[in-house]
Image (tube, helix red, strand yellow):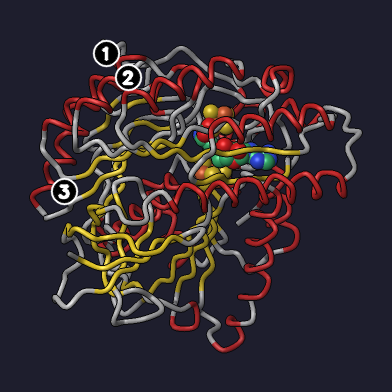
Amino acid sequence: MKKEEFVLPSLKVAQRRTKARSNIEKELFEIPHEVKNLGVDRSFYLRTYGCQANERDGETIAGILETLQFTQVNTPEEADLIILNTCAVRKNAEDKVLGELGSLKRLKKTNPDLMFAMCGCMAQEEEIISIILEKYPHVDLVFGTHNIHRLPQLLYQAMMNKERTIEVFSKEGDVIENLPVKRFGTHKAWVNIMYGCDKFCTYCIVPYTRGKERSRTVEDILEEVKELQDSNFKEITLLGQNVNSYGKDLGLDGGFAHLLEEVAKTGIERIRFTTSHPWDFSDAMVDAIAKYDNIMPFIHLPVQSGDNDMLKIMGRRYTVEDYKETFDKLKAKVKNCAFSTDIIVGFPNETEEQFQRTLDIVDYCQFDNAFTFIYSPREGTPAAKMKDNVAMEVKQDRLNRLMEKTNGYARQQNVKYEGMVCKVLVDGPSKKNKEVYSGYTEQNKLVNFVTDKKLNPGDIVEVEILEAKTWTLKGKQI
Ligand code: SAH
Ligand code: SF4
Ligand code: F3S
């Protein structure tokens, strides 16, 4: 296939937002007759990087492939098709994928028919696609986050016509409701409530790789939750880059707070959601979380920085004071609530004083868990054009100091649970020791515990916490 026949991503197009509302499509996904049996006697290996939205996309990709009769395998060595579902949020995430693509190439020697596909957020990047075109000729198929529904046709083209196939849409298009899904969990599931992001934080690539914010309808979401409930799922996590914006594009009254209440009323045992932006966390949301026992007392609330000027340059739309206000409200109203956060250090020109204020907000909130990152410039974002006077050693040193603090609080928060009895949703025997079971508390804390009973994944049991470690709790079933 000639280069002109590829559909390549365009950053310019991805940066643009239009007022046009996305359609809700119930029949757009289809499998052409000739593609129906494409996977007979063929296997695929899928590896997903990045966030929960990408994990959930992986379940759609696996669902499509199994509909085409492919079999999923657990190692790349066994596969006829290797798919890397990628993340672009930081450069080290990308480097991992490019390294992996390079090292897996060797498998083509023993299996010349082996096919490589790349999808996910990296596929949406102009720069990455030119690298793939130039240096990774063994990648046979590239598709993006907006055209997963085209996988049957694209695979057919790449596989049967033996043509290198690249199709990446730069615009998001519609909300497609009839895609198949293969759930990787047996008792915990992801549920998309919306796609895309319109916040345009100045450092972040997600608004360009995932397109504009578009919501699913309350009815479609509830239908999925009820199906999961009927199939014995105990926990769902509602997904969106910023769930607080849910429904705004559809002009829905009540937005996310209303949706949360409706989902809570289904009676499913555990409801989680991610991610909430501190900027538009409404009082109605706080009240809904406080009101329903099946909405879990655990909030991921990314603060990014503890300095107001820095937050402004990051385009975060809240101040440290606003953040504390939301945090305090949640703490006061939601019983025993746990908090996690994301923090970026070494944003362009961050001063030591500004970094100190980030340490201060950590002291104030004493997070149960914090994901800490060194700022990574992303092509096409406003921050990537900023001059930066902070040396990498300084950034690394700040990250180390920050992590020392956040790890200390993680442990301190866990110690509070010693002697307490927690409800634990059982995942199964622990990875390290088959005699021990593991599961998560309502506050999302991993517990390894002993019991003399035979338990099944999905059981909810009471566990007395005997010992706290930094990242896990140890206990026994009562
Ligand atoms: N939608 C989510 C975040 C998705 S990205 C939210 O707004 O909370 C997850 C985290 O990655 C972000 O919270 C941020 O802390 C980090 N991140 C995003 N872009 C980054 C960049 N360019 N460099 C370093 N960290 C980044
Ligand atoms: Fe990125 Fe900000 Fe959107 Fe989160 S809210 S995905 S950090 S632009
Ligand atoms: Fe990564 Fe894309 Fe998620 S960039 S964090 S996989 S939205």
Mark closer to the chain start, 1 or 3:
3
Front disc: 1 or 2: 1
CA separation, marks 1 and 2?
Answer: 8 Å
* Residue at 67% across, 38% down: 344
Q: Is residue 60 left or right of residue 356?
A: left
Q: Identity of the amino acid at label 1?
A: Gly
Residue found at the far front of this picture? 419
Mark 2 CB within 8 Å of ligand 2 = no
Mark closer to the chain start, 1 or 2:
2
Mark closer to the chain start, 2 or 3:
3
Q: Is residue 386 left or right of residue 446?
A: right
Q: Identity of the amino acid at label 3?
A: Leu
Q: Above or below — where is 264 with respect to 58? A: above
Residue with the mark numbered 2:
247
CA separation, marks 2 and 3?
Answer: 22 Å
Residue with the mark numbered 1:
254
Q: Above or below — where is 278 with respect to 203? A: above
Q: Is residue 371 left or right of residue 381?
A: left
Residue 460 percent location from the top left of the image: 17, 57
* Residue at 52% across, 22% down: 198
Residue 40 percent location from the top left of the image: 28, 75
Residue with the mark numbered 3:
228
Q: Is residue 207 left or right of residue 299?
A: right
| Helix, strand or loop status at disc 2 | loop
CA separation, marks 1 and 3?
Answer: 24 Å
| Helix, strand or loop status at disc 1 | loop
Name the residue nearer the viewer: 93 or 379: 93
Ligand 1's image quarter is top right
Q: Above or below — where is 322 with respect to 80? A: above
Name the residue nearer the viewer: 377 or 271: 271
Residues at marks 1 and 2 touching, judged by CB atoms closer than 8 Å: yes
